[in-house]
Image (tube, helix red, strand yellow):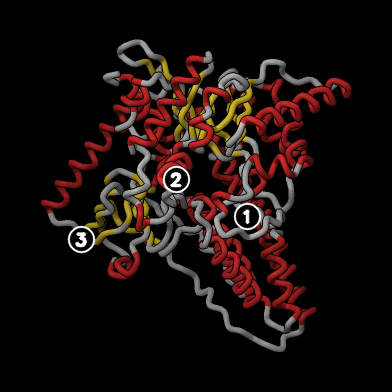
Amino acid sequence: MLLKGVGASAGAAIAHIFYIKQLDLSVEKQEGSNPETETGRFEKAKEQAFTELDVLFEKTAVTDSAAAQVFDIHKLMLDDPDFCDGVEDALSSGLNAEYAVKTSAEALINFLGTLENEVMRARAADVRDISERLIRILKGLEENDDGPNEEVIVLAEDLLPSQTVRLDREKVAGFVTKRGSVTSHSVILAKTMGIPCIVGMGESFDELPKSGELAIDGKTGEVFVSPSDNERNDFLLRVEIFRQQKEDLEKYRNMTAVTPKGHTVKVCANIGGVADADAAKTFGADGVGLFRSEFLYLESPSFPSEEKQFEAYKAVLEKLSPKPVVIRTLDLGSDKQAPYFDIPEEENPALGYRAIRICLKEPQIFRTQLRALLRASIYGKLQVMFPMITHLGQVLEIKEIVGRIKGELDKEGVPYSKDIEFGIMVETPAAAVMSDEFAKVVDFFSIGTNDLTQYTMAADRMNSRIRDTFNPADPAVLRLIEMTAKTAHENGIWVGICGESAADTALTDFYMSIGIDELSVSPASIPAVKKAVLSSNS
């Protein structure tokens, strides 16, 4: 029997099924409960949840410090104001603790589901994880710690982050889930491990047996139940081809990416936090081309302090030193909303109050981040990038603010590097068209092709109905990129690509032909991009 899901991590596998059974976490609504009693139950459950998460963090950190970070995120989310306020409101109205947790989590999950950003939507799994942990504790159920004792394909309706990181990676040949998205923790883990993963099986998942053998292809989304001899032989061939492809790419990890005509390109990593820096190093990154600093804000229950930001930036710079690290300043707004930062609802947030527009209107927030960045600069090669720039006045204002902060640090005797490069993201047609003016006042350009395509083609990148219109390879988009690269080089500054299309090897020849100096991609994509550069025809 052949079934189909969404291929999320390429590769093929044949193995026995390991089904992760869902605990009975059904909840009944009980009205007229004693608010004081139920609040006490909720607080006690939170205490136990914190203890469990501490144990899981310590256990996981022994073998995978990056994966262990998910448990720190869960601890923060246990105190998330939106989540806790919802629970407290339900408890005060006389509802039982289990139902209060369930309804508050569902409200937050539904909100996250409305956001355009895939990463933010994937955080719904974290909310579900902590709510189910609390409900399990409130119901007095034990956590199921049994794991596979042989190499298996893991089946689950949805793999929660805490379930994923506790699996023995050496015994996981693949993942198949009923729900889930291509940015879920299980998919991220699968890509890092280089194993096939299929998500979003939907109703087809219910046709899968709970035991027996499966053959899966993480690229096509194919799932063969109890494969025949012919199907088995076909999959064994697919497994071998995938193994050879992985082996072939391994040799490119630490190579320098130079075209046959002698153009050297840095292949860097896009990261969202300190934990991702390890993956960048593992896959042979020439540096970090995009550190999305907004994730420090999105994963915090309140505005992160200067000290907290300083420690995060310092950690990444030290891990990558002496390689360069480009840190993008705060890019909140649009589809990235922090619950404690009350950004008014907008009809068209992608064109609204976001990124540098917020920073220049909220100087204290911007000042805190810039001070943290400057202080951390002595621990590596820092490059600071400003997002959503549309006119020259913004850059001149930023330079004045940076100058004032440097003066403050000088008076305080706080050291900072004098060699920091400051650049802008070219992600609007305005920035591309005026790139000749911007190139005179900045040290580099990094082209964000996701937004540049969206704004150039007037096509919402998350709208599946107009997917054909949202095309990063459209001639209009490529002409703006070529114009930006030309003006950068004419003014003696470097130019990179940090959008999704940087990893599209079908565009590598074009990027090499116009002299792009840096391609920044997800860590796992680095070897393939380096290979494409080394074999480029341009």
Q: Residue at x 43, y 48 (%)?
A: 458
Tell me where residue 502 sits by quadrant.
top left
Query: Mark 3 or 2, which is nearer the eye?
Result: 2
Location of residue 89 in the rendering, given as x and y in whole percent from the top left corner: 73, 75
Give the residue at the far bottom of this rendering.
Answer: 32
Tell me: residue 346, above or below residue 496.
below
Give the residue at mark 1. 74
Tell me where residue 387 sits by quadrant.
top right
Q: Which mark is residue 2?
A: 3
Helix, strand or loop status at disc 1: helix
Please state which amino acid type lies under the numbered disc 3: Leu
Location of residue 358 in the rendering, given as x and y in whole percent from the top left corner: 68, 45
Is residue 312 toward the left or the right of residue 525 in the image?
A: right
Q: Residue at x 55, y 32 (%)?
A: 425
Query: Mark 2 or 1, which is nearer the eye?
Result: 2
Please state which amino acid type lies under the numbered disc 1: His
Q: CA distance from mark 3 to mark 1?
A: 37 Å
Q: Are marks 3 and 1 in contact (CB under 8 Å)?
A: no
Please state which amino acid type lies under the numbered disc 2: Gln
Work out whether residue 109 can be spotted: yes
Tell me: residue 501, above or below residue 128.
above
Q: Which mark is residue 454?
A: 2
Location of residue 203 in the rendering, given as x and y in whole percent from the top left corner: 32, 69
The earlier-in-sequence mark between 2 and 1 is 1
Q: CA distance from mark 3 to mark 2?
A: 37 Å
Is residue 458 toward the left or the right of residue 247 in the image?
A: right
Look at the image and tell me in which quarter the N terminus lies. bottom left
The earlier-in-sequence mark between 3 and 1 is 3
Look at the image and tell me in which quarter the C terminus lies. top left
Helix, strand or loop status at disc 3: strand
